[in-house]
Amino acid sequence: MAKKEFKSESKRLLDLMINSIYTNKDIFLRELISNASDALDKLYYRSLTDENVKVNKDDLMINLAFDEKKRTITISDTGCGMTKEELENNLGTIAKSGSLNFKENMNKEEKVNIIGQFGVGFYSAFMVSDKITVTSRSIDSDEAYVWESEGADGYTIEKSKKKNVGVGTEIVLHIKADTDEEDYSKYLNEYELKSLVKKYSDYISFPIKMECTHHELKDEEKHEYEDHKCVETLNSMIPIWRKDKKDVEDSDYENFYMDKFNDYDKPIKVISSSVEGMCSYKALLFIPSHAPYDYYTQDYEKGLSLYANGVLIMERCGDLLPDYFSFVKGVVDTEDLSLNISREILQESHSLKLIAKNIESKIRKELEDMLLNDRENYESFFKTFSVQLKYGVYNNYGADKEKLENLIMFYSSKKQKLITLKEYVENMKEGQDTIYYASGSSIAKIDSLPQVEQVKDKDYDILYLTEYVDQFAITAIQEYEGKKFINVESEDLNLESEEEKESTKKVNEDNSDLLTAMKDEIKEVSEVKFTNKLKNHPVCLTSKGDVSIEMQKVFDAMPNDMGIKAQMILEINEKHPIAQKLKDLYAGDKDEFIKYTKILYAEARMIAGLPVDNPTEISTLVCEVISK
Ligand code: ADP
């Protein structure tokens, strides 16, 4: 029979698996058991929603067996099974998770991480097997098919020769021969298999059965024993979220998380909650320590696994999580929903809404608590998911801002680390009545902004906004504890004394012709003026009104130009020698004056991080001036 090739990406993955880049080979068993459990869940759910499918709950189980002589381990389940097409699609590719982009220069660890994110699942069996035979009959088919593969060079599929194969799947692993480094034979052992099931799959809600051998004392006097075989259920079957917290080790929760949600890393936080009252449910929630590879793509689907009385009714229930907590993973098990509730009714369900509300506030409280008591971890969490939280602040016209404003942090110019808004306000100087912030693409760039200097000189702290969502979030918050936010880039920071203001006003009045001439040359700015706030810098751009220069950059980068522009002001430092130079040129050499105007405006744009539209012209002008 012709061998079929694996899809090329699967082949590369298989190569990696077979060459065992995973150090923890033990996980193959939990992956296969977990697939079996999913198949049983699917079949059971089908029986609740399809009257043609009848299932006896007692028949739903997973069987484990091994044969030391033949070197095989068999995992079978009475789940939904797979059709020929499903065998082909599910086991012939891993394409479901999108493309695997291994770069040539990636190291082993990076590859493991990528693979981990795809949930190697079934393929992990190749770490310990040199041949795998899968026999499966789907609930939708009268025939059973056999899929077989010896590794990366391909697989075969044919109709099963056996008669009367029941619905479900049987996977036979042919265990590799031992090598100098690796003892594969250890898996062909009752004790080893039992302890692997206990360790990784105890919570599985269907019985995992195996025929076990007991030494029974036959004759006490003669000390004679007899081997006695009986089928045992290896797992406690109590879902981990239903267990008492004190009976569960941290590592149990972590293993459950990594297995169920295909993560190679422990979660940064485990939240377990049990609620009785208006609504009753148990929830086990996890905050991942890093964003899933597809988190910031359209493909990412938020949601929690929803169980009704221990039965999975929805793999990913999005309604249980607000968008701003979409990174949370976990399960919710409730008695308040009926098993065969349809998806449409579920969405409208009052109980579900109540649970969702509770869960939202539980997550929020836990995060607030982490921020207070476990700062280091919180910061690490925040660095990973801050964009989502800040997006939550301004989304829906700021409807949720009160819920989230105490969870967000910004870099502080004074503390030189992340601080909360509360911390900023607590440390405000006497007489300071606004919260200052500055935006730019990096801390270093913001630090060197001319406008930042004057605020620092007054010994005020400044929040540095480096993410494009930041300013939108701040704009949505408007004020915190009665303190308004003010962008250091805005025109009027109100930092000057009355005399200073008076004297600048006079300079501007005295030079109004010069300033108008400059303004006429640069169409994009709404005003050109002398100011005295710039210390050593010659020029800068500030903005007036609701749209800041940083926001304009975001709008400019959007595919459909909505024409939203900041109202910019070109400020010239009246104490800088350039001020006098401009006055001299305006009086003596108008052509030269225009050239200087163009150069200065280009400089101000560069400092603000805006593109210079006429770089060739500007560089010619600069050369002309400096060659003199
Ligand atoms: P994952 O479980 O992450 O989807 P796997 O490679 O482990 O990835 O499995 C691929 C698919 O094969 C599963 O999604 C499922 O549809 C199917 N499958 C695997 N094992 C079984 C099984 N025992 N019974 C029915 N279907 C299965």
Image: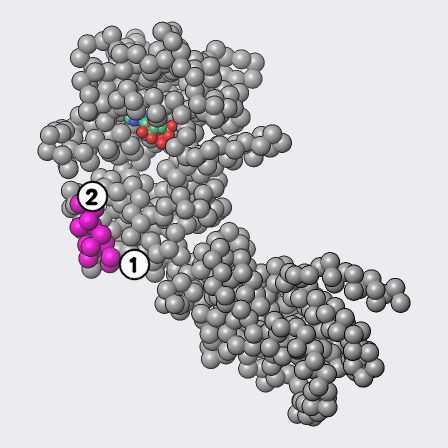
* Magenta part of the chain: 342-354
Classify residue 623 by image quadrant. Answer: bottom right
* Above or below 260: residue 91: above
Give the residue furthest to the front.
591
* Local SS, label 1: helix
- Pick the residue in front: 557 or 203: 557
> Looking at the image, do the residues carrying marks 1 and 2 touch, with CB atoms under 8 Å apart?
no
Which residue, given by chain and number where applicable, does mark 2 sit on?
309
Which residue, given by chain and number where applicable, does mark 1 sit on?
358
* Above or below 617: residue 61: above
Decide if residue 473 is in sight here.
Answer: yes
Decide if residue 374 is in sight here.
Answer: no
Q: Is mark 2 within 8 Å of ligand 1?
A: no
Q: Residue at x 22, y 39 (%)?
A: 311
Q: Residue at x 30, y 24 (%)?
A: 86
- Pick the residue in front: 522 or 321: 522
Tag 1: amino acid = Asn
Q: Is residue 443 left or right of residue 14?
A: right
Q: Residue at x 59, y 66 (%)?
A: 439
* Above or below 149: residue 600: below
